[in-house]
Image: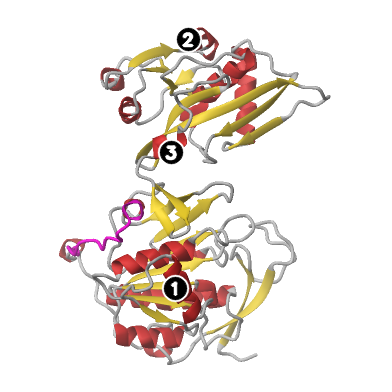
Amino acid sequence: MNRKTKTAYVCTECGQDYGKWRGKCDNCGLWDTVHEIRIPASPGETSRYGASAAAAKKAPAGARKLAECAMDQAPRMTSGIGEVDRVLGGGLVRGACILLGGDPGIGKSTLLLQLAARIGKTRRVLYLSGEESPEQVAMRAQRLQVGDAAMELLTETSVESILATLGEATPDLVIIDSIQTVYSEALQSAPGSVAQIRESAAMLLRFAKETGAVMIFIGHVTKDGSIAGPRLLEHMVDTVLYFEGDGSYQFRVLRTVKNRFGPSGELALLTMSDDGLHEIANASEFFLMNRHQPQAGTAVAPILEGTRIMMVELQALVNKSHFGMPQRVASGVNQRKLALLLAVLERHGGVVLGDFDVFFNIAGGLTVTEPAIDLGIAAALLSSFRNKPVRREIAFIGELGLGGEIRPVNAMSARFKELARMGFAECIVPRPSRNAEWMNDSYGITLTTCAKVGGVQELLF
């Protein structure tokens, strides 16, 4: 073996490194995914942005005191799409590297092509496509009504050639579609392998940091929804975005998983149409289509996604089981969470649902993980069980404990503000502590307190 190469064993699904080959990856639990890769110790002199011997010979940079490091006062680059700017923390930061992942056909290329067309009006944008020909990209641009956009198009997959072009063009924004198609000629492995993704991303990232260009990578995802390639890729970039959606619905969710320049956990809502993606200005109205026609088994709760408050409709169906084993089906929440809440209702609420099928859904196809909807789920279940709709213009906020107690959640005042804006008149909330300030800031909402889940039934109908 050449002494200039190093051997490593890496899982192609999660990127876990091992010192020797093994049949099963201990990190992701998959079989036959650990493969041998060879990484040259000196990839060559092809680019000043690669990990080459020439780069190693450069004079080391001197250390500086933190107070002497001047903060870049350049304003953020706005994308022209308000929802995208919000999830990024206010816009694109110079020198930032962003990774966008999502299922095939969800609209990743569509979103970035629209973004490139809008930014291209005032900045220099280079769209690099490794999966489509220029004619195919132009056809898609015509469908999105951005065929005359002032941006440049490059179809290249060699990272050395890409960096040479970028060095001459000096763009403000570079879009790589996708990072799995880019490869380095200095490595022997195939494009899309762990070594290729790692080295190519490192070279492009170094270019972005030295020149101030914004770099956006499109990343493929695996069957479990995580971004394909080494997990190190998500650690290397500054921001990780996931583009989510369901083929049964027109809306798409752009979620921030990691952001070094703003809050993580932000969420943007977009709708897909024939001419591209459009913003959803009022998310609460979008998810509350049948709010003025209450029916048994529905309840409304405000949720917090990042810094945004949205109203969601919780739907439950409790029906007598005609089989030996009652069904428990949940859509939009974890099924184990639904089973836990049913156990709390039976133990502390006096409602026995052991012989009933229980189906739960969050209207619109949204997935919610925060515990603030626990009380709303319990209200929807009780409403369906009693076959009585809850009172109109009422919402629910609270987390259920295993002892049946109802606990307060964060951002209570912000949730009350959104309820008041949507015209709700009453909200059932946990019993506050002595120093709870949110009780004095209800924005005109009538707050009905409840300490235990057993007392909720008396307040619903």
On the image, numbered disc 2 is attached to which residue? 459
Query: Closer to the N terminus: mark 2 or mark 3?
Result: 3
Quote the CA–CA distance across marks 2 and 1.
55 Å
- Quick one: 136 or 348, which is closer to the camera? 136
On the image, numbered disc 3 is attached to which residue? 286
Query: Closer to the N terminus: mark 1 or mark 3?
Result: 1
Q: Within 10 angstroms of label 2, few (less than 14), some, or many (20 or more) residues?
A: few
Q: Within 10 angstroms of label 3, few (less than 14), some, or many (20 or more) residues?
A: some
Query: Which residue corresponds to the image point at 68% horizontal and 61% vertical from the top-left?
Result: 25
Q: Is residue 337 left or right of residue 93?
A: right
x and y, in percent, of residue 93 in the image:
28, 63
- Indicate the quadrant where residue 6 lies: bottom right
Quote the CA–CA distance across marks 2 and 3.
27 Å
Front: mark 2 or 3: 3
Q: Is residue 76 left or right of residue 371?
A: left
x and y, in percent, of residue 306 in the image:
38, 43
x and y, in percent, of residue 307 in the image:
34, 41
Residue 340 belongs to the span the image colors magenta: no
- Quick one: 103 or 410, which is closer to the camera? 103
Q: Is residue 295 above or below residue 248?
A: above
- Quick one: 451 or 251, which is closer to the camera? 251
Magenta segment, which residues? Answer: 71-84
